[in-house]
Image (tube, rainbow, N blue to C red):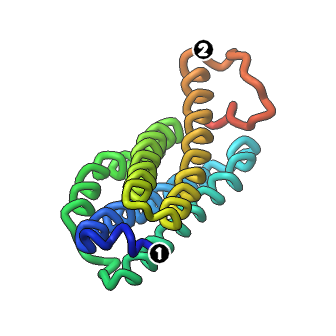
């Protein structure tokens, strides 16, 4: 896989893959931290979303491992620092700083939402590049992961919306109780 993409420039293809890989590694750390804070504040509400958050974390880890395998299959170093991986690492420092140093769930989910937006854009770009290169097998693989990332984005966005409504409207806000998000601000 990815041979058609790499045909024109193996180095550039590896640069794009290493960029995504650096971000996926950061994503796993972000999810680990959010899950850690959720566990320390265990409640019925956080338990309702914990399994979905764990599933998303596990998908991020699968993306990381898949990308490592793709980089190695092209003869690259999955731990190399490339121009694009360095850029994405610098760009994500602010998000990582919030998640690693803040213990307020609304802040963590807000930062995670920003990360998911970037993550979606990165997978979308890879899918478009594969399409333009005529590498349909790679395009399908990228789109599979893009669809998983879209699910992450929608879910985290819903959590941020619920937490924001709660913050704006206060304790008496009439939000649906079935989604398990009401107690997360405490």
- Residue 48 lies left or right of residue 12; in this view the side is right
Residue farthest toward the left in the current orientation of the protein: 83
Residue drawn 40% across and 56% down? 126
- Residue 4 lies left or right of residue 60; in this view the side is left
Residue 82 lies in quadrant: bottom left
Disc 1 from disc 2: Cα separation? 51 Å
Q: Nearer the viewer, mark 1 or mark 2?
A: 1
Would you name the residue on which mark 1 appears? 1
Q: Nearer the viewer, residue 131 or 27?
A: 131
Residue drawn 41% across and 46% down? 121
The reply to whether dot 1 and dot 2 touch (C-beta < 8 Å) is no
Q: Nearer the viewer, residue 159 or 21?
A: 21
Q: Quadrant of the C terminus?
A: top right
Task: Give the answer, above or below, for where 101 lies relative to 8.
Answer: above
Residue drawn 38% across and 66% down? 21
Would you name the residue on which mark 2 appears? 169
The earlier-in-sequence mark between 1 and 2 is 1
- Circle 1 residues within 10 Å: few <14, some 14–19, many ≥20: some
Residue 67's spot in the image, x, y percent?
Answer: 44, 71
Residue farthest toward the right in the current orientation of the protein: 178
Decide if residue 65 is in sight here.
Answer: yes
Kind of element beneath mark 2: helix
Q: Nearer the viewer, residue 162 or 170?
A: 162
Residue 151's spot in the image, x, y percent?
Answer: 61, 46
Task: Give the answer, above or below, for where 28 lies relative to 174.
Answer: below
Residue drawn 42% across and 72% down? 2
């Amino acid at each position: 896989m990815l041979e058609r993409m790499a045909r024109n420039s193996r180095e550039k293809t590896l640069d794009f893959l290493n960029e995504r890989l650096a971000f996926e590694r950061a994503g796993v750390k972000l999810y680990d931290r959010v899950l850690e804070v959720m566990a320390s504040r265990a409640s019925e509400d956080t338990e309702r979303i914990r399994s979905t958050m764990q599933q998303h974390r596990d998908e991020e880890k699968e993306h990381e491992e898949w990308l490592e395998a793709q980089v190695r299959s092209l003869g690259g170093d999955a731990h190399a620092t490339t121009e694009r991986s360095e850029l994405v690492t610098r760009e994500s420092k602010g998000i990582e700083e919030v998640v690693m140093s803040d213990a307020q769930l609304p802040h963590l989910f807000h930062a995670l939402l920003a990360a998911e937006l970037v993550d979606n854009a990165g997978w979308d770009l890879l899918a478009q590049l594969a399409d333009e290169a005529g590498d349909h097998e790679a395009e399908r693989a990228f789109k599979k992961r893009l669809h998983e990332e879209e699910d992450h984005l929608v879910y985290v966005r819903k959590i941020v919306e619920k937490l924001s409504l709660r913050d704006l409207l206060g304790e008496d806000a009439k939000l649906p109780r079935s989604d398990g998000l009401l107690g997360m601000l405490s």
